Image (cartoon, coloured by chain):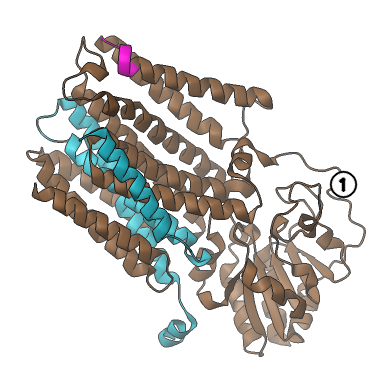
Chain colours: A brown, B cyan
Amino acid sequence: MSFVYLYLLATALFIFGLKRLSGVRTARSGNRFAALGMAIAIGAALIEAGVLTWWALLLAAAIGAVVGLVLAKRVPMTAMPELVAAFNGVGGAASAVVALSYLAGELIDGTVLADTAGVSTDTAVTVPISILIGMATLTGSFVAYMKLGGKKMSHPVSGSARHSLHAALGFGALAVSLWLVLYAESTGMQITAIVLLVAISAVLGVLLVMPIGGADMPVVVALLNSYSGLAAAASGFVIGNLLLVVAGALVGASGLILTKIMCKAMNRSLGNVLLGGIGDDDVAEDARDYSNIKESSGEEVAMLLDGASSVIIVPGYGLAVAQAQHVTLELATELEARDVQVRYAIHPVAGRMPGHMNVLLAEADVPYEQLFELERINGDFQNTDVVIILGANDVVNPLAREEGNPISGMPILDVDYAQTVVVVKRSLSPGYAGIKNPLFDLDNTLMVFADAKEALQEMVNEVKEL
Amino acid sequence: MPFEIIFFVFVLGAFIGFEVITKVPPTLHTPLMSGSNAISGVTIVGAIICMRADNPTFAQVLGFLAVVFAMVNCVGGFLVTDRMLSMFKSKAKKKKEA
């Protein structure tokens, strides 16, 4: 029974590690405690499993470890959203395959799963759930991965027919699950049921993520994170392992908390995000009707910055696309050398995953004390000389303060209260919400139409010459 | 193991999760996500048990596949989280390095 205590030790380390992961100073050690817990869990599993085909196990572990290592070390920081999505996906896949392996080990020709010796009816029910969550997490993460990589995808069915289709697939999964657990007696029927269940789950995962727009990706990534935990918990139900159940529940909960934070940052309910609100490609007719656009250049902005005493930089997805994080720091360093106070205002859903901007700026060595969250910096915009917006749009749209548009009520950064607002953007095209941004028309707004990296480089050069 | 006990533990585990992660600073949203995702790689335990020698061959083959997936998940997840966290620097630390 000794392995049970090792599982308990691993569980404790996971909880302890997760706790430390949510504090800036303790995060790195927290991650290591969790990794230690994983090593202990693997040791315990080896004891529990008993006789193993060692060469096969070592081969599988080596393949997985090498792939994981290479991905973790090689993938550039700008591709982190894709990598996180991919890891969520393989986690789901592992859980689904464990449930399939359980079926392969237990199912007997001539007996339905629920009547099989050694399989309780309760456990039998959790098997299809585990396959469903695991497969849907896998294919949903794959679609998220493609979307994060910039691939455009739209749902094959639109309108209310879409919801009917999803509901039909959901009922299909339920029916096939019941068939598998209670009625599929012969091996042929059992295999048919399993294949159908895997297929329906896979299609559901794809269809549920497909219609979700780019601006909503942080919610989806956080939600898939939660699902990868639930998938692990579900396989814990199947094989009766409490470590998997607790660890999965922990991850499920933490993913759900993040999902909630993201939804709150957009003033939308989870249901609204999943059923598709913003993100469908409709653009308002007046989205490009601007009358008071003042185009500016790097040179003019440099002069403005030179005379400023406080500057706030607002990064958005455009910063990530242009990979402008390093040149951003260069400009900030140049300004700080001239006694300009530089801070960064980070909107919770800026970018494509929770915390995207923080990771990107950290890569460029921006100290995290200079990154301010919305609540902490919003009151300071009115005392700020220059705000530079780098490829952000909806999160600084003052229309959010008004009623009757897709972003009404969404918390925004109050950049328009600053002395001067510089918007670096490639064109006047609307953000994901598909509406006009009156910020661009304000008297105190200057537009620099360029790629964030080029525009910033020009500003750095000009500031240096002053 | 009785289903009731497993379910009981699941609900308590979820409560612990909600309690432990009450306030997450935005700086840590991504590392928390990838770190917790690495923890969900704990499925490796189930995968190893599927590979035990007295299991039917096909079940073992699926176990092999599950070990590969779960291993990518935990090794990659923990390492990339560590890589990310190593980049988060405070002003004081940055000066020390310079």
Task: Locate residue B52 relative to residue A368 in the image: left or right.
Answer: left
Q: Judging from the image, what secondary structure is the residue with disc 1 in?
A: loop
- Residue type, mark 1 in image: Asp
Task: Locate residue A69 relative to residue A327 in the image: left or right.
Answer: left
> Mark 1, residues whose alpha carbon is within 10 Å: few (<14), some, or many (≥20)?
few
Q: Position of residue A337 (x, y in %)?
A: 62, 89
If the image is split into quadrants, where does the C terminus of chain A sit?
bottom right
- Where, by quadrant of the figure, is residue A175 drawn? top left
- Residue A284 highlighted magenta (yes or no): no
Residue linked to disc 1:
A286
x 41%, y 45%: residue:
A88
Q: Is A242 or A216 nearer to us in this picture?
A: A242
In the image, farthest residue toward the right:
A291
- Where, by quadrant of the figure, is residue A387 drawn? bottom right
**How many numbered marks, from 0 up?**
1
Q: Is A59 or A388 nearer to us in this picture?
A: A388
Task: Locate residue B60 relative to residue A301 in the image: left or right.
Answer: left
The chain to which mark 1 is attached is A
Question: Which residues fall within the magenta stretch?
Answer: A180-185
In the image, farthest residue toward the left:
A51
- Magenta-drawn stretch, dominant element (helix, strand or loop): helix
Q: Position of residue B96 (x, y in %)?
A: 41, 87
- Where, by quadrant of the figure, is residue A73 drawn? bottom left
- Taking the image as drawn, is residue A132 in sight? yes
x 69%, y 27%: residue:
A159
x 29%, y 31%: residue:
A99
- Taking the image as drawn, is residue A39 in sight? no
- In the displayed structure, B70 sits above or below A292; it is above
Q: Position of residue B38 (x, y in %)?
A: 34, 52
